[in-house]
Image: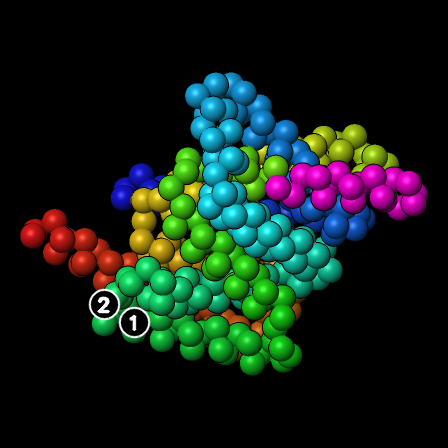
Amino acid sequence: MKKGLWYAILAYTAWGLLPIYWRSFESLLAGEILSHRVIWSFVFMAILLLIGKSRWTEFRKMVTNRKMLLQIGVSSILISSNWLIFIWAVNNGHVIETSLGYYITPLINIMLAVMFLREKPSRSQWVAVVLAGAGVLLATIDYGRFPWVSLSLAFSFGLYSLVKKRVSYDASIGLAGETVIVFPIAVAYIAYLHFTHHDSAWALPPISLVMLLLSGVATALPLLWFAKAAARLPLSMLGFIQYIGPSITLMLSVFVFKEKFSPVLLISFSLIWTALIVYALASMRVARTSVAK
């Protein structure tokens, strides 16, 4: 469990900092950025699998299993949709809304954990959920319109988390399978942009182009860390640790990207962090009780 906690912290910290990375390519179409992200993630994961021959054998077994292939297909669609919405939002001035989306996600995770995994949060943990929900509601009201970006991000990643929690294959093998599913679509889209003279990636400055080629590493490592965390932690606990990511993103939106930060949003932010503290203390109590038994 301790190892899973560290993996979760690494994953969510990396995700919180990603808006800075994707802003480097704001001159490109969101679909073009996503396609490169998928292609170079596929290349990176293929190299990892080839280095470990035993994992390559496991990968071949997995893609010939219909049930696992279906799970991979579903998770691939969910995470690709999440990536596309996030990239579009960051490069179109909606960083605060992405932050709100990932604040909502833990609430979705808890709902899914109760509905599908039969997890039972304690009374204190439910108090934390109510506090966090109040914070999210305030942020939504302050935003002033239906937060479709936030809700799309929350539901796509919440469902992705649930699928990852229910599978039994190794994290790197699962991610390789997810990239294989969408790789042909990404290649086809890049080819379409090239033949219609709408591709812009190869005109980027050399440093930006190298960064784009490294998007596979920037994508794969946090997902690998997340998958390892998901295998070791309850989904509801994983959801609350996720507040690290949107908190970093929110600070970036205000101090780096200079988006509007109102007093109401400050109250919302405070409620959500209070919820995180309450939940953490309650989880520690539950852990100590389990050890004592």
User: Image point 56% across, 47% down: which residue?
Assistant: 73
Q: Amino acid at mark 1?
A: Trp
User: Image point 69% across, 46% down: which residue?
Assistant: 34
The residue where tag 1 is placed is: 126
**Displayed quadrant of residue 85:** bottom right
Say if the magenta span includes residue 184: yes
When the figure is inspected, residue 53 is found, relative to residue 109, above or below; the finding is above
The answer for how far apart the CA atoms under marks 1 and 2 are is 6 Å
Q: Residues within 10 Å of mark 1 (few under 14, many from 20)?
A: some
When the figure is inspected, residue 107 is found, relative to residue 246, above or below; the finding is below
User: Image point 28% across, 42% down: which residue?
Assistant: 2
When the figure is inspected, residue 222 is found, relative to residue 259, above or below; the finding is above
When the figure is inspected, residue 13 is found, relative to residue 214, above or below; the finding is below
Direction from residue 232 to residue 180 in the image, left or right:
right
Secondary-structure class at tag 2: loop
Direction from residue 42 to residue 30 in the image, left or right:
right
Q: Nearer the viewer, residue 69 or 39?
A: 69
Magenta part of the protein: which range?
A: 181-198
